Amino acid sequence: MGGNSVICDSRFQLKKCAAERLDNYDWMSRLPDDILVVILSSLPLKEAGRTSVLSSSWKNLWKQTSRLNFNASSALDKIARDPKLRCEERRMYVRWVNSVLKSAPRKEALNLEHFRICFDVGKGFSGTITKWLKFAFKRRVERLELNLLEYGDNESEKQYVFPEDILFRKSIDIPHQTTTLYNFNSLKVLCFKNISISDEAIEFFLRNCTSLEQLVLQDINQLSNLEVRGPSLVLKSLYESFCVGLESIKVSAPNLTSLAVSITEGLVLENVPMLVDLAITCQKRHMPLLVPALSCCFSQLEILTLRLPWGYKDHDIARFNFPELLELKKLVVDFTPERDASVLGLMIFMRISPNLEEFLLMVGGSDYLCVIIWLFVCFFPFSPFYHSLLFIFLFLLAPI
C-alpha cells in the first residue's frame, strides 16, 4: 500500500528563516545618527527621551535633538483645575528642564533650532531662568520662546526681569561702548510673554540679530517707548499686545509684512512698503488718531483687523473719513457697541473696499449670547461692484 510522501525543501526553510530574520531586523538603528537625531527632533521632547531605553546605541541620541520644546500642557491643565498644585508642578517643571539641559552635549557647535519655555514660573526662579537663556544663546538658538505665566496673576512685581547683562558687557574705559557676549546672528524668531524687559534690551536684539524675522511681545512690563528700526533690519512680522505702560511704538522696517499693535496714540509708521497685514486696537478716545496713524499704508493693505472695544455707536466710524482701501481683501472688525447701537455704520467699510472678499464682524459684550450667522452674498445692495463675490462671516452676540 503506497503512502503519500512529504518532501522537505531545505532551501524553502532557509528562505523562510531568512525572511523572518529580515522582518525582525532593527533597520532603524542602522540609519546614520544624524538622520536619527532629525527624526527624534520632530517628536515631543518627553517621547524623544523615552527612546533612550531602546538600546545602548539609542541611549544618548535624544540628547542631541535640536528642538527643546518644554511643553507641559497637561501640568498646566492640572493647575487650572486645582491651583493648589501650582507650586509642586512648578518645581517639577524646573527639575525637568534642568535635567534635560544638564544631560545635553557640551558641544556649542550644535545649534538649537527651537528653545521654548512655557510655564507658570515666577520671579522666584530668576537665576534658573537666566541659566536657561544662557544655554540657548550659547547654542545659537534660531527660535526662542519664553512665556512664564500661563496661569496666575499677571503682576509686574512677580514677573521675571530680563537681565541686560547677559546680552552685553559695558566698557569701563570707554563710555557707551558695549561688548556683545553671544553671537545672535542665527536668531530668527523671538517671542517674549509675561516678563519684564526694557526698551534697550529689545532694541539690542533688533540691532544685533541680523536674521530676526519675527518678534512677539505680549504682556510685557517695563516697555515705554519702543523703536523698531535699523539699516540692516530684516524683520517681517511684529506682534505687540497688552504691554502695560507702553506709550509709543515707532516702526521703520522695509521688509515688514505683518504688524499687530495694541496702541494707536504714539504709533508712528514710516518706511513700511511691504506691509499688507495689519491688526490694531483703538480705544474710543483715540479714534481720531487712527486714520492719520495708518495713512502711509492704507493703500497697500490686503488684510486689516480693527479691534474697537467698548462704547461705540454705529455713526462713530463713518465720521472719521477712512480712505479707499483698494487692495483690501479681508477685513476683521472686533466691535463692542453700546446697547442702543447697531452695526450698520460699519458697512462703510464695504463701500470703501471694492475688492473685499471676506468680512469677519465680531460684535459682543459681557452679557451677550453668541450666535453664529453665515451669510453668503453675491449682490450687495449698496455696493456698486455687483460682480464681486463677497463672503461675510458674521459673529453676533445677541442679548439673551
Image: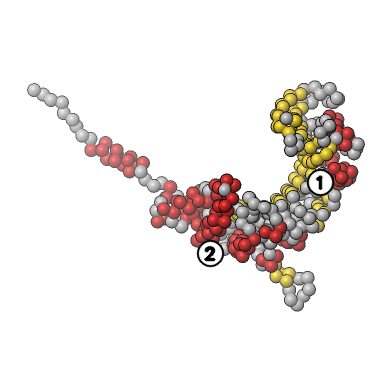
Residue 143 appears in the figure: no
Horizontal and vertical percent for residue 27?
41, 46
Per the rendering, the mark at residue 106 is 2
For disc 1, the neighbor class at 10 Å (few under 14, some 14 to 19, many from 20) is: some
Horizontal and vertical percent for residue 388?
79, 26
| Residue 369 vs residue 246, the one in the foreground | 369
Helix, strand or loop at disc 1?
loop
User: Is 26 above or below relative to 96?
Assistant: above
When asked about the image quadrant of residue 97, the answer is: bottom right
- Residue at 89% x, 43% y is 288
Position of 87 with respect to 25 (left or right) is: right
Helix, strand or loop at disc 2?
loop
- Residue at 67% x, 59% y is 158
What amino acid is found at the position of numbered circle 2 in the picture?
Arg
C-alpha distance separating marks 1 and 2: 44 Å
Q: In which quadrant of the rendered image does the N terminus lie?
A: top left
Q: Give the number of the mark in front: 1 or 2.
A: 2
Q: In which quadrant of the rendered image does the C terminus lie?
A: top right
Q: Which residue is mark 1?
A: 273
What amino acid is found at the position of numbered circle 1 in the picture?
Pro
